[in-house]
Amino acid sequence: MARNKSFRPQREPFFHNERVTPSNVHGPFSFLNPTRAHFELNPEKQASGRSSSEERLSQEKPQSSSSVKFLWRSRDNRKGRHPLLVDKDGAASISTPRPTPHPKEVMKTIGKMFTYYPVWDISWLVAYIFTWGSIVWCINAFFSFLPYIRSTSDFKGEVLDAGGITAFIGAVMFFELGSILLMLEVVNENRAGCFGWAIKTLIEEDSSQDKLQVCVNPQACTHHHRNTKNLVGRSATAKDSNTISDTKQEDSSRTWQWFPTLQALRSHYIHELGFLASFAQFCGATIFSIAGFTALPGIINNMSQGLTDGIYWAPQVIGGCGFIISGTLYMLETQKNWYTPSFGLLGWHIAFWNLVGGVGFTLCGALGFAAGNHGAQYQAACSTFWGSFAFLIGSLLQLYESLQKHPVEVGKKS
């Protein structure tokens, strides 16, 4: 069987849990791990300590659970998100929070971007750091590009001092730090399966049938971000005895890890699209940081042209290629197959804009080799300009994504 059609032993979400049934397991490449799956909910198989409402659910409306599915996606799982799919035809018999595309939900999440700072959530930290790094690069782009289009705005040290210092801050302090956190995020993914919702029955006296209610249940979440005491401590454990999550697994309360074991690296991570994308991002940022360091005033203006090509422009090209590879792999991770874009998923758009940003930074380095050509230098500065803003768009979308932990999608069963 192709590797993307089933989960590896001990890596299947909700392993040994009869209350959820996996279906439609797949990924874009047959030689890599699955990136998405549907889990049919079977609330009639609740644990022995279930409430009277759950007893009523199991006896009178077990068929309603087929109208709602838990969507497992490798990216969402890594980001601590719990996506739910509600069947459009059966939505009338189910009570769920508003779909996430609803204008009120969008405005609420945008408001949280300016008022809520969960510093204990590594996914939020990654997005927050990349956002500020992108802002620094946008400022750098103005210093580099503005003199070409409006010479009157030029001031002493604009390109050398202001441009060099902002390049160093953006490349070394933000891109490199954010890429390290991306690696830590992927090796600390939730392995046990985290449902994060509660299923109840609303008893309606004026109706012959009761209504199934699915609501957010923070106590059932076992993702690391629910541990608000520290960033690198023990993962959270579910406190609800009736949670769908299989809290008996030791993995649900495992401690933070800095590096994967060699066995886990060979058997799992090397086949994981999210890990490969994060590793490409980390390698690209590390090499790109060389250019950020050599851009500092006192270094860049004291190097020969050959040395400038070798340790300033070349790292930009190689590092930018790493960003392109990373953005492409992140896009593929969200797709059903390698050739079908997932326009309806926020993660796809985040990866797309990061890919565009990577192309811009790569072009900047490639055009920079033509030192004496005014047109090439103009296009190099222009590529940094639009590439920086593409990174900013992707980072803002990622910040939005990190604060939307319980997305609700409405669609057909198929």
Image (cartoon, rainbow, N blue to C red):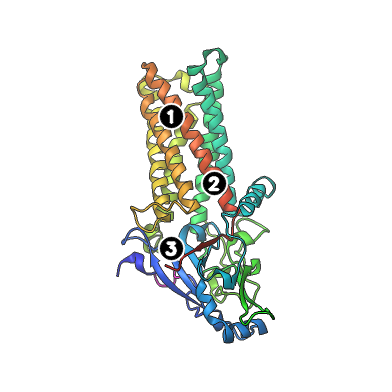
Q: What label does residue 374 carry, if any?
A: none
Q: Which residues are magenta?
A: 8-12
Spot the residue most to the left. Answer: 1
- Residue 9 location, x and y as percent? 40, 72
**Is 280 located above or below residue 337 in the figure?**
above
Q: What label does residue 383 carry, if any?
A: 1
Give neighbour class at mark 3: few <14, some 14-19, many 20+ (Cα, 10 Å): many
Cα gap from disc 1 to disc 3, whole angstroms: 35 Å
Q: Looking at the image, which residue is at 58% across and 43% down?
A: 129
Say which quarter of the image contains residue 51: bottom right
Cα gap from disc 3 to disc 2, whole angstroms: 21 Å
* Frontmost residue, 268 versus 216: 216
Q: Looking at the image, which residue is at 31% across and 62% down?
A: 30
- Amino acid of disc 1: Ser
- Residue 407 location, x and y as percent? 56, 59
Cα gap from disc 2 to disc 1, whole angstroms: 21 Å
**Is 383 located above or below residue 52 in the figure?**
above
Please, what is the dominant secondary structure of the magenta stretch?
Answer: loop
Sequence order check: which comes first, mark 3 or mark 2? 3
Q: Secondary structure at mark 2?
A: helix
* Frontmost residue, 288 versus 354: 354
- Amino acid of disc 2: Leu
Sequence order check: which comes first, mark 2 or mark 1? 1
Q: Looking at the image, which residue is at 43% across and 29% down?
A: 383
The residue at which mark 2 appears reads as 397
- Amino acid of disc 3: Arg
Instruction: Using the rendered image of the protein, determine whether residue 201 is visible from the camera's viewpoint.
Output: yes
The residue at which mark 3 appears reads as 36
